[in-house]
Image (spheres, rainbow, N blue to C red):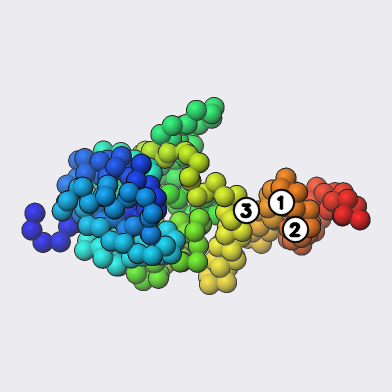
């Protein structure tokens, strides 16, 4: 196929030699064929290079010293030749019609910054819903459109289910390389504040749950979530008006509360008390947080 591809699929990876082949096979088997595949190896020490290079010229391989997933994605986007970028995680699997569905919507809404959809769980054994976004919520998002409150209330964006305009991605500065977990939410906020977003009510990838998921680091995830919200409010003052002070306070306070509880479970009472007092600062009249603070402060004494 001559000329530049329509879509660049960028896969950032680190020590996923045992999983990345499944991801690559799912991309190479897409019903939509006008795409290139870029793998950015973020300093792996396992057999990742060997696994990827076995695919020959079907995959463009880049290696960098370990700088984190955001930096790896930025490098992949820099080398992308297509006007649309699909970021994939190297432990998940794309649905066969992933690119076909998203690209059709991108053509329909060429001014949008991002088109994204739903995901399901590849190997979930615990009870609960089988899609990442509940089915009723997914239908509502497709019908009503995406609002900032939707992004804020729950982190609904998974870049494994998204197609992003390279022009818009570059305009907002790409991924924040200081973030290792909440970079999807941060990017979604910045894209939303600058460009239209489109949601598709379809399952477009399968999320693999395993011990290596970086998102399982609860402490870092909560700290970054707070940082991303504060960054949104700092860089886009209009976001406060769209969200309302009460909603903002409740979410940040709850994140500090979760941070405090996690630290207490890990027997770090001093830092647990600090996080609980931050929660109180955001919701000073919420009795639950004050009770915890009194009990823990007494235990410290």
What distance separates the C-alpha of mark 2 from that of mark 1? Answer: 7 Å
Pointers 3 and 2 in contact (CB under 8 A)? no
Dividing the picture into quadrants, the one containing residue 169 is: bottom left
What distance separates the C-alpha of mark 3 from that of mark 1? Answer: 8 Å
Classify 53 as above or below 82: above
- Pick whichever of labels 2 and 1 is earlier in the sequence: 1
Residue 248 at what x, y percent from top left? 64, 59
Q: Which quadrant, please, contains the N terminus?
A: bottom left
- Is residue 43 left or right of 29 when viewed as pictured? right
- The residue at 43%/32% (across/down) is 123
Pointers 3 and 1 in contact (CB under 8 A)? yes
Q: Is residue 260 visible?
A: yes
- The residue at 45%/66% (across/down) is 177
- Is residue 103 left or right of 119 when viewed as pictured? left
Residue projecting furthest to the left: 2
- Pick whichever of labels 3 and 1 is earlier in the sequence: 3
Disc assigned to residue 271: 2
- Pick whichever of labels 3 and 2 is earlier in the sequence: 3
Towards the viewer: 196 or 258 = 258
Q: Is mark 3 on a helix, strand or loop?
A: helix
- The residue at 25%/58% (across/down) is 61
Residue 80 at what x, y percent from top left? 25, 63
Q: Residues within 10 Å of mark 1 (few under 14, many from 20)?
A: some
Q: Can residue 192 be seen in this view?
A: no
Residue 291 at what x, y percent from top left? 85, 49
């Amino acid at each position: 196929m001559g000329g530049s591809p329509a879509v660049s699929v960028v896969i950032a990876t680190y020590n996923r030699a045992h999983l990345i082949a499944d991801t690559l096979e799912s991309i190479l088997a897409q019903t939509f064929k006008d795409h290139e595949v870029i793998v950015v190896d973020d300093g792996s020490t396992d057999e990742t290079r060997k696994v990827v290079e076995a695919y020959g010229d079907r995959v463009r391989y880049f290696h960098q010293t370990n700088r984190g997933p955001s930096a790896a994605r930025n490098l992949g986007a820099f080398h992308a030749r297509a006007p649309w970028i699909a970021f994939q995680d190297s432990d998940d699997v794309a649905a066969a019609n992933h690119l076909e569905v998203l690209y059709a919507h991108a053509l329909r809404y060429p001014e949008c910054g991002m088109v994204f959809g739903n995901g399901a769980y590849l190997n979930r054994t615990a009870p609960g819903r089988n899609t990442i976004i509940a089915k009723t919520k997914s239908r509502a998002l497709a019908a009503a459109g995406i609002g900032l409150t939707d992004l804020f209330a729950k982190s609904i964006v998974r870049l494994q289910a998204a197609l992003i305009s390279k022009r818009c991605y570059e305009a907002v500065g790409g991924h924040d390389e200081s973030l290792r977990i909440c970079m999807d939410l941060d990017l979604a906020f910045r894209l939303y504040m600058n460009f239209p977003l489109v949601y598709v009510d379809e399952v477009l990838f399968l999320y693999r749950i395993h011990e290596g998921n970086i998102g399982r680091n609860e402490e870092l995830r909560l700290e970054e979530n707070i940082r991303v919200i504060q960054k949104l409010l700092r860089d886009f003052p209009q976001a406060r008006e769209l969200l309302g002070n009460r909603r903002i306070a409740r979410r940040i306070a709850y994140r500090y509360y979760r941070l405090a509880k996690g630290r207490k479970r890990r027997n770090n009472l001093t830092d647990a008390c600090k996080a609980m007092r931050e929660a109180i600062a955001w919701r000073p009249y919420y009795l639950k947080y004050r009770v915890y603070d009194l009990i823990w402060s007494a235990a410290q004494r």
